[in-house]
Image (cartoon, rainbow, N blue to C red):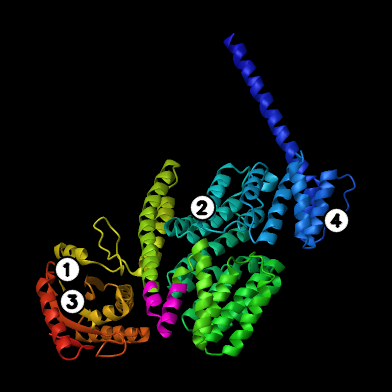
Amino acid sequence: MKKKLIFFLTVTALIYFTVFKFSNFSNENKIKNSPVYKTVSEYYATGNISDKYPSASEKEKLFIKALKLYEENNFKDAEILFKNILKSDEKDPAVLFYSSLYLNQCKNEINGYGDFTLVENSLNIMKDYSILSNKTHFIWQLISSVMTDIKSREKIIILLESYLKEAKDLTLESSLKIKVFTAMLKMANEEYGESIYMYYDILSEAQKIKDSESRARIQIKSYEYLGNMYFILEDYKTALKYYNKAMHIPVKNQTDNALAKYGTYINRSESYIQLKNYEKAKECSLETEKIIPYLPENIAVGVKVFRYKNLLLLESRKNNFEKAQEYYNLCLEYLKEDKGSAFLNGSMYVEIAHCEMLYLQGKYDEAIEKLNILLKKDLEEEWGFDTSIYFMLLELYKKTDQSEKYFETGKNIYKAEKKFNDNLKKDYIEFVKNSYILDQMKKYERITKIKIISLGGFAFLAFISIIMGAFQIKKLNRKNFTDALTLVYNRKYMDFLIEKPLKKPINAAIVMIDIDHFKNYNDYYGHPAGDIVIKKTADILKKSLRKDDIVIRYGGEEFLLILKNADSEIFKDIYKRIAKNLKDENIPHEKSPVSDRVTISVGVCFKHFEKTLNLKESIKEADKALYISKENGRNRFTVI
C-alpha cells in the first residue's frame, strides 16, 4: 500500500510539474508572440509604431492606438486609453505590463512624477516572466519616476531587493545592474556604508560575467559611483582616480561605450573645476561632446544639460559672466526636453550653479531668493543639496549684513554636517558588520580561502580607504576616540597613546595650536559660526600634515599635533603649509586685533621618547611656547 501511495504521489508531482512547465512556457511564448510585445520592441529599436498586426485583439489594438498618442506627446488622451485597458477584464500579461508601464510614463509626463502602485504592479508582472524579468531599462524607467523623497527611495529599495529574490531566470548581468540601482539609491539616502559595500561586491561578482562587454559596463558604473562617493566627500583627486579607472575600461561598441561612460565624463569635468584646473576641465568637456552623437536622444539631452552646467560653473569662476550666461541659457533650453533619463535633478544642479554665478557677479539678493526656493525643495525631497546651499547662503548673509539669518544658517550647517558625519560613523560600523556576514556566507558556501580574502579583504580595505582616507580618521573603535565636531582625535585618544608602548624609540615635535581671539569671534559671529571655524581649522591641519602625523582636539579652540620623526626644518615646512592653507581659506574675523582673517598661534617643543609617548611634560613645554607666541603678538610660532 505504501509503495502504491509513493508511486501515486510521484506521478501526481510529475504531472503537476509538467503541466506547470508547459503552462509557463505557453505564457512566455504568448508574450513573445503578442502584437503588443512586438510593437513595443520595434518601437524601442526603430522609433516606429507599426500597424501590421491585423489579428490583434481589440485590447491590443487599443494599446497600439494609445502608444501612438504617447509618441505624439498627447499624454492625456493616451492616459485615458491605458486606464481603460487596465480597468477591463484583460488578462494578457503583455497587455497588462506595457499598459501599466506607459500609463506610469504618461503620469510622469503630466505631473512630473509617476504612480508608485503602477510601478509596483509592473515589477510584479515582470518578475514572473523570464522574457520580461531581464529588461533592466524598464526597471530604471519605472523606479526613476517615483524617486521623489527619502521615503519613496526606501520603498523602491525594498521593491528591488524583493525583485532580486523572486524574479524568474534573472541573469547575473541583470542582477548586478539592479544592485547598482539599489546601491545608488542607498547612497542618495546617505546609507554610505551599505552603498560602498555593494559596489565592491558588484565589482567582485562582475568578474564572473563571461561576456567582456557586459562585464565592462558593470565595472564602469561601479567605479563611477565609487568616484561619486569621494566627490561627495570633496576628495576630488581620489574621485578622479576612480573616474579614470572607469574611463580606461575598453568597450568596443561606440554607443555602448558612450552609454556606460557619460556619467564619468561629466563628473571628471566637474572634479577638475573644483580643483581649479580649468584647462583640464575644458578638455574633459570637449571629450564629452565627442560621445554625445552616439547616445540615444533622451540620454543625449541630459548629458548636454550637465555639460553646459559645468561650463557655466567654469566660466563663472573665471569671471567670464557673459559666456557663463550663454551656457545657463543653453541649460534652460535643453532642460525643457530633459526627462531625467541621463541624470536626476538636472534643474537643481543647474540652478545651484547659476546661484554661484549670481553670487560672483555681486547679485546677492537674487541669489538669496533663488537659493531659498531651492532649499525648500531639497528639504522636502531630501536629495542632500542642503549643506552646499546653506554654505552659499551663509556667505551671502554675511555680505548683506543679515546677522540673524547668518547665525540661523550657521546652526543649520552644523546640524547638516553633524548628521552627515554621524551617518559616516554609523555606516562604518554597519560596513564592518556586513563584511563579517559576507565572510561567513562565503565560508558556508565553501568558497576557497583566497576568494574570501580577495572579496572580503579588498572590500573592507577599500571602504576604509574611502571613509578614513577622506577624513584621515585612523580608527573608529569602541573607545570612541573621535571628536564629534571635527572628526579628528579627542583627548581620550591622547590618554590611550600615553599608555600604548612604542615599537621603537622616536623623536617627535609636540605642537600646541590656538585660534587667535576666538572668544571675540564667538561673541561677534555666534557659536554655530565658531563651530564651523573650529571644524575648518581641523580640516586645514589634517590637510597640511604628513600621513603619520596626529591631530588631536585638545579642548575648545586648541589643537595638539604629534609630528613623529620631525626636526626643526620639517616642523617649519609643516607650519608654512598650515599658514598657507589657512590664508587660502580666507575666513573673516573682524574682531581680531591681529588680522581681519582667522589666524593661529603655535608653540612647539622637540622630544625624544623611549618606551611610551609620555606627553605630560612635553605638552607643558609646548604650552609655554604657545603662551610666548601670544605675548609676542600672536599669528606666529615659538620653539622652546
> x%, y% of residue 104?
68, 54
Quick one: label 3 or label 2, which is nearer the N terminus? 2
The dominant secondary structure in magenta is helix
* Residue that label 4 marks: 50
Query: Looking at numbered disc 3 in the image, what kind of residue is underneath it?
Result: Ala
Give the number of the mark in front: 2 or 4.
2
Residue 9 to residue 332: above or below? above
Q: Quadrant of the N terminus?
A: top right
What amino acid is labelled 4 in the image? Ser
Mark 1 or 4: in front is 4
- At x 39%, y 52%, the residue is 435
Task: Specify whether 360 is left or right of 305.
Answer: left
Residue span colored magenta: 389-408
The numbered mark, 1 or 4, whose residue comes first in the sequence reads 4
Residue at horizontal 63%, vertical 65%?
Answer: 340
Which residue is identified by label 3?
508
Give the residue type at disc 2: Glu
What separation in Å lies between label 3 and label 2 (alpha carbons)?
50 Å
Disc 1 target residue: 504
Mark 3 or 2, which is nearer the eye?
Answer: 2
Residue under numbered circle 2 = 154
For the question of whether residue 243 can be seen, the reply is no
Task: Examine the rendering and report whether any part of residue 295 can be seen.
Answer: yes
Q: Position of residue 263 (x, y in %)?
A: 58, 69
The CA distance from mark 2 to mark 4 is 39 Å
What distance separates the C-alpha of mark 2 from that of mark 1? 51 Å
Q: Secondary structure at mark 4?
A: loop
Q: CA distance from mark 3 to mark 1?
A: 13 Å
Q: Residue 413 lies in magenta, yes or no?
A: no
Query: Residue placed farthest to the left in the image?
Result: 617
Q: Is residue 293 left or right of residue 482?
A: right
